[in-house]
């Protein structure tokens, strides 16, 4: 016995196709396209989250299916909003810091993608830029080790690292650490 709901669905589906097959096919095609877009959008947003949380390791390029998503993210309101939230939190923390009179309180800033933006470069190159492995420029050391050693040198000179801001976890992790760290968004590349 065929369930009543199935027959009813079949009847309405048959009526829709008989009445306007071209409209029915257009609707079905649009639904499939929308579903694929939603699927890619969801996947790419999850991929971006994985990059930001340092879970996506050893990737070489933005996945091809995510290039448009990354383009929209980096040049749209969401990237600006994500960055603004970090900036607002940083400013609130800066206002709360009691600065000593000795001039030894320090806030460490990364340069690229923190103080300077490479978004125009990414736009020219299609937002599919690659993973960077900058060991050679860090004297053969992983970036987190190299940057930790630089922070240790500053502390040895009497500086107190009040805060640090960067787009890579290697800008913020390791020892010594700042009293407070601020991670800016960057789904374009990862430096270990």
Image (spheres, rainbow, N blue to C red):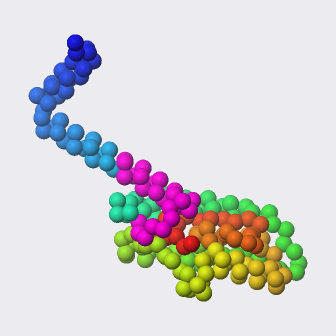
Drawn side of residue 40 relative to residue 134, left or right: left
Drawn side of residue 117 relative to residue 107, left or right: left
* Residue 71 visible, this angle: no
Q: Main SS of the magenta segment? A: helix
Outermost residue on the top side: it is 1
48 above or below 159? above
Question: x, y percentage for residue 151?
Answer: 73, 78
Question: x, y percentage for residue 3?
Answer: 26, 15
Magenta stretch: includes residue 67: no
The image quadrant of residue 29 is: top left
92 above or below 105? above
Q: Which residues are magenta?
A: 38-62
Question: x, y percentage for residue 73?
Answer: 45, 60
162 above or below 65? below
Question: x, y percentage for residue 88?
Answer: 66, 61
Outermost residue on the right side: it is 101
Drawn side of residue 24 relative to residue 154, left or right: left
The image quadrant of residue 93 is: bottom right
In the image, 127 versus 97, the foreground residue is: 127
Outermost residue on the front side: it is 140
């Amino acid at each position: 016995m065929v369930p009543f709901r199935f027959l009813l669905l079949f009847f309405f589906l048959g009526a829709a196709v008989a009445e306007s097959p071209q409209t029915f096919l257009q609707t079905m095609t649009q639904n499939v396209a929308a579903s694929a877009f939603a699927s890619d959008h969801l996947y790419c947003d999850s991929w971006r989250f994985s990059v930001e949380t340092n879970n996506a390791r050893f990737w070489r390029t933005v996945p091809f299916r995510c290039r448009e998503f990354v383009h929209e993210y980096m040049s749209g309101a969401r990237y600006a909003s994500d960055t603004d939230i970090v900036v607002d939190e940083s400013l609130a923390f800066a206002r709360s810091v009691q600065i000593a009179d000795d001039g030894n309180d320090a806030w460490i800033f990364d340069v690229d993608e923190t103080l300077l933006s490479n978004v125009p470069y990414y736009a020219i190159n299609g937002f599919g830029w690659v993973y960077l492995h900058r060991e050679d420029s860090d004297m053969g050391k992983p970036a987190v080790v190299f940057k930790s050693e630089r922070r240790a040198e500053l502390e040895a000179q009497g500086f107190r690292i009040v805060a640090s801001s960067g787009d890579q976890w290697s800008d913020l992790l390791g020892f010594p650490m700042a009293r407070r760290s601020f991670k800016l968004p960057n789904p374009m590349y990862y430096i270990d």
